[in-house]
Amino acid sequence: MPSVVWFFLLIPLAVELAWVFWPAINSFWLSLTRWNGIGDPEFIGIGNFERLLSDPIFGQAILNNVIWVIGFGGFSVIVGLSLAVALNKPRRGVGFYRSAIYLPMVFSLAVTGLFWRVIYQPDGAVNAFLGSIGLGSLETQWLANPDTALYAVLVAAVWRQVGYIMVLYLAGLKGVDPTLEEAAAVDGASPWQRFWRIVMPQLSGVNSVVFAVTVIDSLRTFDIVWAMTRGGPYNSTQLLSTYMYQTSFTVLDLGYGSAIAVVIFALAIVFIITYLARAAKED
């Protein structure tokens, strides 16, 4: 029997090594080379990483990623948590609202991007709504304007993500001890005090999961940006992931693209390990 168990464990392990770990390790090696996908890679050491330091598009992508992490993470968590609190208690129609809010998660990011791309067209729903309420002066080509394109894509990404965050917090709220809230209410605590001092500490485990998921999703966001703007206009929506893809598979500079991938990996690891270590220390 133990041999059978090990046999079934070794099969997924072999698949994981072949399709996940080996490509990841190979990406680290390629980041130290110059390679266009043909012939043998030319080893150049840290040349690609030195090139990153003077690359203005990489700098723009870093800045956009910072904005994305703050905006995507902040608004997704705030809105998702607010919806979870509002829809936590059973009442008539609450199941319908939960399903409706979670529904965007069913669609792929590419489909979501195409859907919002139609909405943002000059004759789309956004400009039509602004015109109907007398704010026609605010109408613009949202995805063609470098000043608004990134934030327009960010709104679409948050719209899709809030349902997922809501579900995570709904699961966490089910484990909150209601007697503690009742005792605090008897002692005269306000609803905000009860939520902040009683409920939030009990959601620390969920907060760790939400943080890790949000940071990872922020750093690997690709589909929705590529579907809506392909990093444009003028690299105003370029993220590390889109720049990595563009460099690797459009320009065919696979070594440089791998160096960007290594940076994404390093940023994700630093964020997540730092936060989890801090959370473990607080616990």
Image (tube, rainbow, N blue to C red):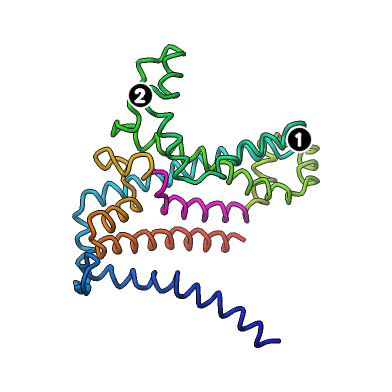
The residue lying furthest to the front in this view is 38
Pointer 1: what residue? 188
Q: Nearer the viewer, mark 2 or mark 1?
A: 2
Number of numbered callouts drawn: 2
Quadrant assignment for the C terminus:
bottom right
224 in the magenta segment: yes
Whole-number angstrom distance, CA of label 2 to CA of label 1 = 53 Å
Q: Which dot marks residue 1?
A: none
Residue at the spot 41% in from the left edge and 31% down from the top edge: 118
Q: Position of residue 188 (x, y in %)?
A: 76, 35
Pointer 2: what residue? 122
Q: Position of residue 60 (x, y in %)?
A: 27, 46
- Mark 2 packing: few (<14 Cα in 10 Å), some, or many (20+)? some
Q: Tell me which corner region of the image, top left, top right, bottom left or bottom right, holds residue 151.
A: top left
Q: Tag 1: residue type?
A: Gly
Quadrant assignment for the N terminus:
bottom right
Q: Tell me which corner region of the image, top left, top right, bottom left or bottom right, holds residue 39.
A: bottom left
Residue 197 drawn above or below residue 92: below
The residue lying furthest to the top in this view is 134
Q: Tag 2: residue type?
A: Pro
195 horizontally vs 125: left or right: right
Residue 87 drawn above or below residue 165: above
Mark closest to the chain's N terminus, 2 or 1: 2
Q: Which residues are magenta?
A: 205-225
Residue in the foreground of this view, choosing between 88 and 179:
88
257 horizontally vs 81: left or right: left
Q: Secondary structure at mark 2?
A: loop
